[in-house]
């Protein structure tokens, strides 16, 4: 089988949830299929990292498209003019369309898959040649737009986004959703929907229980240009961390990830470290005592929680932050409904290392059972085998 993945978010370096899922999917798919990748790159770090995928992919083609101010203004103008959401225009690049068309014509993939909503318009190239298509929906985007602001403008944007992503779901031959709740949403708009949760590769990190290391930092990791993560980072630094620090003055708060906004950068100081575009997350994980995930809105599920569990870092999260994961509150992680409860749960894990060890071991077991790419490989194969079987019968 030959699979072409089209990405408008580069899968490397894998610092954000979208990139981590794309990279895990790529590597797993390459075990049973030839894989080609066409992706946008936004900066020199991504352009340098993309070469590392040559051993995984048969074809790797990148199109450089930095997000300059003129480019953003163009996207805003075209979104207003065309009725296509700004998020989708942010992923449009004529050179990427040309590259997809060329590879589809010359390489003849069996399936073409779009990662995230902004990549779905490129599936038209495959449909025009009767090639089966997959929309890998990391999120229900209209749900995210609904959390951005209040009032009538928000309602209009939500309706606008909902109509567009519903149409893209209908036009794709299959949709892959990350959580059961999001799969249910797509079932209302698409004929073939698969629920394949997020996952990690346990071979990429070593599990060590909290009592065996000296890490005491509060850590938050994610794409720091993504609205829900920005909100979570501000909540952690301004509301959760001060309460924790009163009991543990030596503890620091580390917020790390790609493309931090000004609001995130301004959090730095007085015990808060903001690590922008880190080259290596390993030192940050080794210094972590607790991963704190104060997410209040967004989409998909949190790979950062799975990564923490794989390393033995106990997790404190909101209920929403752990949505879509096979984690039970009080067993695999501690849950708080507001900043005060999140701080209290964090203090408890830092103070009671036996509890932290039990929590970490339980979380690692949940990842082993439900959230590794090895376990999800058969579900991925079923997506493609079903599509190709239907295609042959036409």
Image (spheres, grey):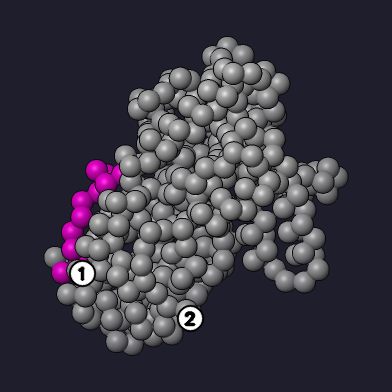
Query: Residue most toward the front?
Result: 393
Q: Residue under circle 2?
A: 338
Where, by quadrant of the figure, is residue 133 drawn?
A: top right
Q: Which residues are magenta?
A: 201-211
Between 287 and 113, the one nearer to me in the picture: 113
Give percent across and percent down for residue 104: 60, 18
Query: Residue most toward the right?
Result: 81
Q: Is residue 359 left or right of residue 228?
A: left
Where, by quadrant of the figure, is residue 150 drawn?
A: bottom right
Q: Does residue 352 appear in this view?
A: yes
Q: Is residue 380 left or right of residue 194?
A: left
Between 325 and 254, the one nearer to me in the picture: 325
Between 178 and 49, the one nearer to me in the picture: 178
Give percent across and percent down for residue 308: 32, 59
Helix or strand or loop: what does disc 2 sit on?
loop
Q: CA distance from mark 2 to mark 1?
A: 24 Å
In this rendering, is residue 364 above or below 92?
Answer: below
Q: Residue under circle 1?
A: 358
Give whichever of discs 2 and 1 has the lower sequence position.
2
Query: Residue most toward the left?
Result: 212
Q: Please state the total of marks drawn on the protein image.
A: 2
Q: Is residue 18 magenta?
A: no
Q: Crowding near pointer 2: few (<14 within 10 Å), some, many (20+)?
A: some
Q: Quadrant of the C terminus?
A: top right
Give percent across and percent down for residue 143: 64, 59
Query: Residue at point 28% right, 54% down?
Result: 310
Query: Residue most toward the top?
Result: 106
Helix or strand or loop: what does disc 1 sit on?
helix
Q: Does residue 265 appear in this view?
A: no
Give percent across and percent down for residue 367: 31, 54
Query: Residue at point 64% right, 23% down?
Result: 126
Q: Is residue 210 magenta?
A: yes
């Amino acid at each position: 089988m030959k699979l072409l993945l089209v990405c408008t978010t580069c899968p490397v370096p894998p610092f954000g949830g979208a990139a981590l899922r794309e990279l895990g999917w790529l590597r797993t798919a390459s075990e049973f299929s030839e894989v080609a990748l066409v992706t946008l790159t936004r900066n020199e770090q991504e352009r340098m990292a993309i070469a590392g995928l040559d051993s995984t992919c048969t074809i790797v083609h990148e199109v450089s498209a930095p997000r300059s101010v003129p480019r953003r203004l163009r996207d805003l103008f075209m979104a207003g003019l065309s009725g296509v959401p700004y998020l989708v225009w942010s992923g449009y690049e004529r050179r990427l369309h040309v590259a997809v068309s060329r590879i589809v014509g010359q390489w003849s993939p069996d399936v073409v898959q779009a990662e995230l909503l902004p990549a779905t318009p490129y599936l038209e190239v495959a449909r025009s040649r009767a090639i089966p298509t997959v929309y890998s929906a990391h999120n229900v985007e209209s749900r995210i737009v609904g959390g951005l602001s209040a009032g009538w403008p928000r309602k209009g944007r939500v309706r606008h986004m909902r109509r567009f992503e519903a149409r893209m779901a209908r036009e794709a031959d299959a949709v892959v959703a990350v959580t059961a709740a999001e799969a249910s949403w797509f079932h209302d708009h698409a004929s073939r929907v698969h629920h394949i949760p997020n996952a990690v590769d346990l071979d990429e990190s070593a599990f060590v229980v909290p009592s065996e290391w000296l890490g005491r930092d509060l850590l938050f990791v994610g794409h720091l240009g993504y609205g829900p993560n920005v909100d979570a980072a501000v909540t952690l630094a301004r509301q959760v961390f001060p309460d924790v620090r009163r009991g543990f003055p030596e503890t620091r708060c580390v917020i790390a990830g790609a493309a931090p906004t000004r609001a995130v950068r301004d959090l730095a100081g007085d015990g808060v470290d903001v690590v922008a575009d880190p080259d290596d997350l390993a030192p940050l994980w080794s210094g972590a005592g607790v991963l704190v995930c104060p997410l209040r809105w967004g989409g998909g599920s949190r790979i950062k929680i799975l990564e923490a569990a794989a390393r033995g870092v106990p997790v404190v999260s909101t209920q929403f932050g752990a949505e879509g994961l096979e984690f039970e509150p009080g067993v695999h992680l501690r849950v708080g409904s507001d900043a005060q409860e999140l701080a209290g749960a964090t203090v408890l894990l830092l103070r009671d290392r036996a509890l932290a060890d039990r929590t970490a071991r339980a979380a690692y077991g949940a990842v082993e059972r439900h959230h590794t790419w090895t376990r999800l490989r058969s579900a991925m194969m079923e997506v493609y085998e079903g599509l190709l079987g239907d295609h042959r019968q036409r």
